[in-house]
Image (cartoon, grey):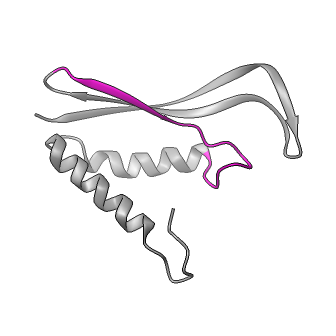
Amino acid sequence: MTISVSLFVVSTPLVVPYASSLGVTAAIDSVLAFVRLDDGRQGCAEVTPIRGYNEETVDQVWDNLNSVVPGLVDLQPQAALARLELLVELLDRPGPDGLARR
């Protein structure tokens, strides 16, 4: 059983824009991931980094996913999960500055 992944960036306009100290937000940008197994099972996930609440931008999320996903495609699901868990473990380890890498 193998995995296929499709990634998309979407912009969702707000019915009413809101203003904050960071400016006016009229739309929320997200990255969507659709995952399919060759046995027909499928799932989806989204990441919505919001300026002022997250350190990451949509562009950074997009770039990070596009660097990770090719290494997961065509793996067995358990192998892909193990690889992702290792990546999360590595990102949670403190860097030279003592801060987590993510």
What segment carries the magenta color?
40-57
Q: Which residue is painted at 50% across and 68% down in the image?
A: 101
Q: Quadrant of residue 40?
A: top left
Please identify the residue farthest to the top as the structure is shown: 15
Q: Position of residue 8 (x, y in %)?
A: 47, 30
Q: Position of residue 38 (x, y in %)?
A: 15, 26
Please identify the residue farthest to the bottom as the structure is shown: 96
Q: Quadrant of residue 55?
A: bottom right
Quadrant, the N terminus: top left
Q: Position of residue 67 (x, y in %)?
A: 39, 52
Please identify the residue farthest to the left as the structure is shown: 1
Q: Is 5 covered by the magenta stretch? A: no
Q: Position of residue 58 (x, y in %)?
A: 59, 43
Does 102 appear above or below 10?
Answer: below
Q: Is residue 36 left or right of residue 21?
A: left
Q: Is residue 64 left or right of residue 6?
A: right
Q: Which residue is painted at 18% across and 41% down in the image?
A: 77
The mark tally for this picture is: 0
Q: Which residue is painted at 51% across and 83% down in the image?
A: 96
Q: Quadrant of residue 7?
A: top left
Does 65 appear above or below 85?
Answer: above
Q: Main secondary structure of the magenta part?
A: loop
Q: Is residue 87 left or right of residue 27?
A: left
Q: Is 50 covered by the magenta stretch? A: yes
Q: Nearer the viewer, residue 42 or 7?
A: 42
Q: Which residue is painted at 60% across and 52% down in the image?
A: 56
